[in-house]
Amino acid sequence: MKLRLLDVAHARSGDKGDTANVGVIALDPAWYPLLARELTAERVAHHFEGMITGPVERFELPNLRALNFLLHGALDGGGTISLKTDAQGKVFSTALLRMVLDVPDAEAKTLKLPGVRA
C-alpha cells in the first residue's frame, strides 16, 4: 500500500548555520521500525534533491521512536545571510512528511497502519 509519512509520523525542523535539522517521530511506537527501515539518509537526500547542496546525515533515537536528519547545504548560508524565504528551515519538516512510502499490504495490516481495512 502507499502510505503518506504524514499518517504515521510528525516532524519538527529548524536550523543551525547552513544545515537544516529535521526530526521525525513515529506516532505509534510500533511504527518506528518501519520508519527506521524506510527513511534512509539516501532516500531523504533524494526527496530533497535540488533543494540541498550537501549530504544528509541520519541519527537514530529509538528510545524516542525518532530519527533525526541533518540536511547540509540546505539554507543558502544560514538565517542571517540567506535570501531564502525559509532561511531557518522550518518547512523542511512539512516537506519531508509529504514523502510516500510503499509498505507491503500484509505488514500494513499487522501494524494496523492508517487506511488499512480490517
Image (cartoon, rainbow, N blue to C red):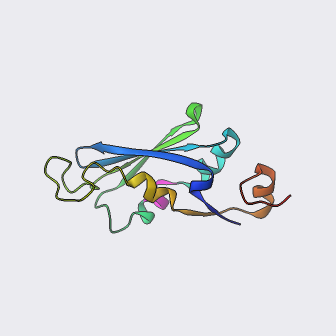
Quadrant in which the C terminus is drawn: bottom right
Left or right position of 57 against 65: left
Left or right position of 86 against 4: left
Above or below for 97 versus 15: below
**Magenta-colored span:** 40-44
Identify the residue at image location x=56%, y=33%.
64
Q: Residue furthest right?
A: 118
The secondary structure that most of the magenta stretch takes on is: helix
Across and down, in percent, residue 111 comes to 76, 50
Above or below for 48 versus 81: below
Residue 117 on the magenta segment: no
Identify the residue at image location x=45%, y=64%.
47
Identify the residue at image location x=24%, y=49%.
18
Question: Based on the displayed image, in which of its 4 quarters is residue 1 positioned?
Answer: bottom right
Identify the residue at image location x=57%, y=55%.
6
Across and down, in percent, residue 65 comes to 59, 37
Q: Residue furthest front?
A: 85
Across and down, in percent, residue 10 comes to 53, 47
Above or below for 48 versus 80: below
Q: Which of 13 and 110 is in front in this view?
A: 13
Above or below for 28 versus 34: above
Q: Which residue lies furthest to the left in this view?
A: 81
Residue 42 on the magenta segment: yes
**Exactly how many numbered labels are in the figure?**
0
Across and down, in percent, residue 101 comes to 61, 62
